[in-house]
Amino acid sequence: MTTKNFFKTPSSQTFLIIVLLLLIAPLFLSVFRINLLGKFIAYAILAIGIDLIWGYTGILSLGHGVFFGLGAYAMGMYLKMEAAHGKLPDFMSWSGLENLPTVWAPFSNPLSLALIVLVPALLAFIIGYLTFRNRIRGVYFSILSQALSLIFVVFFIGQQAYTGGTNGLTGFRTMFGMPLATDNTKYILYYAAIFLLVLVYLYCHFLVKHRLGKILVAIRDGENRVRFSGYDPAVYKIFVYVSSAVIAGIAGAIFVPQVGIISPAEMGIIPSIEMVIWVAIGGRGTLIGAVIGAILVNGLKSGISESFPEVWSYFLGLTFVIVVIFMPEGLVGLVKKYASKITCPIKKRKATEKASSVN
Amino acid sequence: MDTYLLQIFNGISVSSIFMLAALGLAITFGLMKIINMAHGEFIMIGAYAAYMVQNFFSQYLPASFFNFYFFAAIPASFLLAGVLGWILERLVIRHLYGRSLDSLLATWGVSLILQQLARSIFGAPNVDVKSPDWLNGAFLVHPGLQLPYKRLFIMLMVIACMVVIYYLMYRSNYGRKIRAVMQNRAMAASLGINTRRIDAYTFAFGSGLAGIAGCALTLLGSIGPTLGTNYIVDTFMVVVLGGVGSLWGTIAGGFLIGTGNTTLEFLTDATLGKVLVFTLVILFLQWRPKGLFTIHSRSLDE
């Protein structure tokens, strides 16, 4: 795919419009709102990663909160070390630790930020290797990934002296010497989030538009046929799972300095399913759907749940049931359907329907 | 010595709760291939049904009857959870046969709604259900080893449920129809079985079993709207470990996870124990991806 073609597809054009809107948003919104929007962008990055494995490859991971959390904790540990100024981070002395644990030692060095991608990648590789090689798939994988998320939450809460327990990591002060509380830093982080969003989008766009993307979709629609055609689905699945985990880790890393806290509550079972919901509502199998879904659902959530917290649960639950049953393609699918009704004349549409039914 | 015997007893006791919670799931997930994430909420509904029966007995009936409320609570829990399960099947589940992953997501939406509903009706804080007097106290094997009646009673409930399920599934006409539909839907339909009705009843039955599990849980502690979420992952692991679609597998899986949990928690600590159990289950599935008891099939896409 050349850059020329990139601008031609409606979804890429929509993405460009969204990015432009995000870029000029600071002109209209308060710093508080921008900070909130920055958080949603982190979620949008995460959603793209989930869409890559669920929407394209058909692997439903209910444990992506773990990868998000690992990236976020790596960033949080770095920020915590920076805030501690060479001393022991505050929560460790509260839990009675006297020396810095070895796990924490590397985080005084900025190079340790590479762990944001390395740790999720390694974990995803191990899990993916064990499960996909053994042809554990479908709902079995989903249930295992959910157990993974439970394991990590229990573990992180249990090891309070090393992870901060239920409270998680908070009380960050500076990042690379810039104070986090100032408006200036918040704007910088916001633009960094947009930059990462564009980067991740382009990477995934590149993946799914190439031959690899076709194989991913083929694995989703008929894994055995792919195997019989001489491809090893496990290799592709591991690759895409690791990619997705790395993307989740990046999302977590840009989430932490903007929100100022990371706790096990962000990586549990419920947030992990909510991430899937964003993608489902936006439209699985289209990258733009994931972006729209994440920003829209979270925007609505902060709007509705601020004023009517009870209504939000009903609304989210009901929306989800309706979307899954009646519009599996999500909002993007809905728009596509109506757009094609308006743009192409009836005869042409019938022809395209015929052609698509043959496939 | 007594400590170890007590550990074994606790292990069996925890196992029995897992089994009870997982039996309903073994039917909806194992036989119907529906991943019901709202299964935990049906447990919660059963628990609240027991709570309502208890309130009814203490308010409207003479005090002497109160001790027997639990015998009314068990069928009430089964019926309320079963009826709600039937409604759920009619409204939502029937659109989702053959779409396992979608059923998982849609029922998760349902679980959100049910939890919020419980919160609106009964309030967010936990409520207590008072156990009948005759269940307080313990069976004294010898001093130092006491087996609480409540836990023994729950074990009896589990055994009773298993017997009923066994007869229903393997010895009755209804069970034969269920198994026929699950094995080959089209063939069953052509032989005159009303598959839609079977689907609805089976799902309702599975949900009702979850209700009984909830009723049993009221004996062990206070209940709240999120009661079910604590059990959902464990029960799914029980079914996966045991082998999907096999009732024996569910019993074995419940036993292994329950005793594994208590033993490892006893040997290490509460958090590490849980982590170890799940890690072991994941590793076990490397060796036998289909679980302990597998149903052999030549079909490629299970």
Image (cartoon, coloured by chain):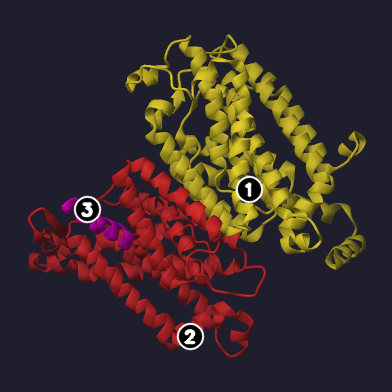
Q: Closer to the camera, A127 or B18?
A: A127
Calculate the distance from the C-alpha at mark 1 to the C-alpha at mark 2. Answer: 40 Å
**Which chain appears yellow?**
A
- Which residue lies at the image location 24% right of the left edge and 52% below the top edge? B221
Q: Are marks 2 and 3 on the same chain?
A: yes
Q: Secondary structure at mark 2?
A: helix
Circle 1 is placed at which residue position? A129
Circle 3 is placed at which residue position? B4
| Residue A76 visible, this angle | yes
| Callout count | 3
- Which residue lies at the image location 60% right of the left edge and 12% below the top edge? A176
Q: Secondary structure at mark 3?
A: helix
**Residue B17: x percent and y percent?**
32, 60
Residue A159 position by quadrant: top left
Residue B56 position by quadrant: bottom left
Q: Closer to the camera, B70 or A321?
A: B70
Amino acid at pointer 1: Tyr
**Residue most toward the bottom?**
B191
Tell me: A75 left or right of B119.
right
Circle 2 is placed at which residue position? B176
* B268, above or below A171, in the image: below
Calculate the distance from the C-alpha at mark 2 to the C-alpha at mark 3. Answer: 43 Å
**Residue A305: x percent and y percent?**
49, 38
Amino acid at pointer 3: Tyr
